[in-house]
Image: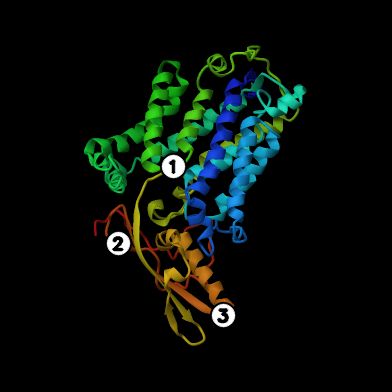
């Protein structure tokens, strides 16, 4: 295992990836400002639906969230040029994690991936060549890196894509229900909207997605299929970028390709004047036992997290329990009709909640269809009424449709959600059974 992890190889791939990664961080951060994402997600709402347990984590007031993102963008530039690299990538990781746990209205598995990738990049020696740090401190300069840096990307991407492929192997995806709904939502696109409705395109999205996710990493690892796989990646990720607008992830995925091509090829392509390291020396650091333990535990967690929904009662498509951090991407569509009723315990007076009084437009959908967000909104209502000196109960009637099916009741309307606790390790009993296999 020492040879597998600590054998040194040429570091050209890691150096150029650092540059790509920093540039993409910059684009992601300033893009969120320019597109209005921050305004819609963090500024307009009166509060955000944070990850449960992070209630203290709320957006900064006034213009500070724009400044927050501007700082992240500047840190991206610092990462790109390798200036105070470890401090810069550590700072970005903490700031990005703050935003990730701060809100769920715009949840995306790619945001989670960016958080864990940034955290791992802290430990990587990505600043030891073609960086300001190496320029200022020549002793830092190195043309090699331990093999674990490349191995990390192989394993992490294999886990991500494999789970993404397996998650699509369920009836509503295989019979084209979900892909067709996804394409129907893009009918308004100029020029291509009508084209996306053709059966051939829907089949490409459905079965091309399964095949691509399942085969892309093995094909990139095998020299004979590597160029074909990279060409397929360009088509697939540019299609996703244009049609689904998933931020920097498609371009980040293309940047990962530098680790799959031969190190000599990458060195000749990007750093022709850089000496090529070919000694393959095994340099076992003093902290090797601790590192190996952390490395193994990390990947055990990465393998286990996407499986946790199998240990929770109910269909994850319905309950959402175990959905996040499990590479379940664009797998279902939901629509809902939901009402919240607040009852004053002292007077027994009931009040029907108007969403406009509490939620932004972007928050209404998750507060109508996602059980954890519904519970959080009930808790929020209880706190708001407590400020008025009222002790209340909160009851919810939520009728939800999954993948175009007839709407069914999601929440037990007899349960006061303001009084129940959230259990993160088991099924919430007030979520009614789904019976998604029924047609009516």
Q: Residue furthest bottom?
A: 347
The relative height of residue 78 versus residue 422 in the rendered view (above or below) is above
The residue singled out by tag 3 in the image is 388
Nearest-to-viewer mark from 2 and 1: 1
In the displayed structure, 383 sits above or below 317; it is below
Q: Is residue 49 visible?
A: no
Marking on residue 218 = none
Type of colouring? rainbow
User: Which of the two residues, 118 or 433, is positioned nearer the viewer here?
Assistant: 118
Q: Which percent across, then down, holds residue 169?
A: 34, 40
C-alpha separation, residue under disc 3 versus residue under disc 1: 42 Å
The dot on residue 407 is 2
Crowding near the residue tagged with mark 2, few <14, some 14–19, many ≥20 C-alpha atoms within 10 Å: some
Upstream in the sequence, badge 2 or badge 1?
1
Q: Earlier in the sequence, mark 2 or mark 3?
A: 3
Where 330 sits versus 279, above or below? below
Q: Secondary structure at mark 1?
A: loop
Q: Secondary structure at mark 3?
A: loop
Q: Which residue is mark 1?
A: 246
Residue 130: x, y in percent? 65, 23
Residue sitting at 51 percent across and 64 percent down?
Answer: 376
Q: Position of residue 95 (x, y in %)?
A: 62, 47
Label 2–label 1 contact, CB within 8 A: no
Q: Work out how far the residue at label 2 is from the one at label 1, CA to CA, in angstroms.
A: 28 Å
């Amino acid at each position: 295992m020492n040879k597998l992890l600590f054998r040194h190889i040429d570091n050209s791939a890691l150096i150029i990836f650092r540059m790509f990664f920093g540039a993409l961080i910059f684009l992601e951060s300033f893009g969120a400002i320019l597109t209005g994402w921050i305004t819609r997600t963090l500024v307009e709402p009166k509060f955000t639906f944070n990850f449960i347990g992070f209630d203290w984590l709320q957006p900064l007031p006034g213009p500070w969230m724009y400044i927050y993102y501007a700082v992240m963008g500047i840190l991206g530039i610092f990462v790109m040029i390798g200036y105070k690299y470890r401090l810069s990538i550590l700072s970005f990781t903490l700031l990005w994690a703050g935003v990730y746990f701060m809100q769920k209205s715009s949840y995306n598995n790619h945001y989670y991936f960016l958080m864990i990738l940034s955290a791992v990049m802290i430990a990587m020696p990505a600043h030891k060549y073609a960086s300001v740090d190496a320029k200022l401190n020549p002793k830092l300069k190195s043309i090699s890196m331990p093999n674990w840096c490349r191995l990390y990307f192989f394993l992490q991407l294999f886990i991500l894509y494999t789970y993404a492929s397996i998650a699509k192997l369920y009836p509503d995806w295989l019979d084209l229900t979900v892909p067709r709904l996804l394409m129907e939502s893009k009918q308004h696109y100029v020029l291509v909207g009508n084209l996306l409705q053709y059966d051939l395109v829907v089949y490409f999205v459905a079965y091309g997605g399964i095949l691509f996710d399942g085969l892309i990493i093995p094909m990139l690892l095998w020299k004979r299929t590597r160029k074909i796989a990279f060409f397929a990646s360009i088509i697939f990720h540019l299609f996703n970028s244009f049609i689904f607008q998933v931020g920097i992830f498609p371009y980040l995925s293309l940047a990962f390709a530098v680790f799959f091509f031969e190190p000599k090829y990458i060195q000749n392509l990007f750093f022709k004047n850089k000496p090529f390291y070919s000694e393959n020396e095994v340099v076992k650091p003093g902290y090797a036992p601790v590192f190996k333990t952390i490395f193994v535990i990390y990947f055990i967690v990465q393998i286990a997290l996407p499986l946790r929904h199998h240990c929770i009662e109910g269909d994850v498509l319905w309950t959402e329990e175990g959905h996040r951090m499990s590479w379940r991407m664009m797998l279902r569509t939901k629509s809902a009709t939901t009402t919240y009723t607040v009852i004053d315990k002292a007077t027994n007076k009931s009040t029907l909640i108007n969403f406009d009084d509490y939620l932004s437009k972007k928050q209404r959908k998750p507060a109508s269809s996602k059980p954890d967000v519904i519970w959080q909104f009930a808790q929020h209502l209880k706190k708001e009424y407590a400020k008025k000196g009222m002790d209340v109960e909160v009851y919810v009637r939520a009728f939800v449709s999954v993948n175009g099916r007839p709407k069914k009741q999601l929440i037990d309307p007899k349960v006061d959600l303001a009084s129940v606790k959230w259990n993160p390790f088991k099924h919430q009993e007030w979520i009614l059974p789904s019976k998604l296999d029924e047609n009516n």
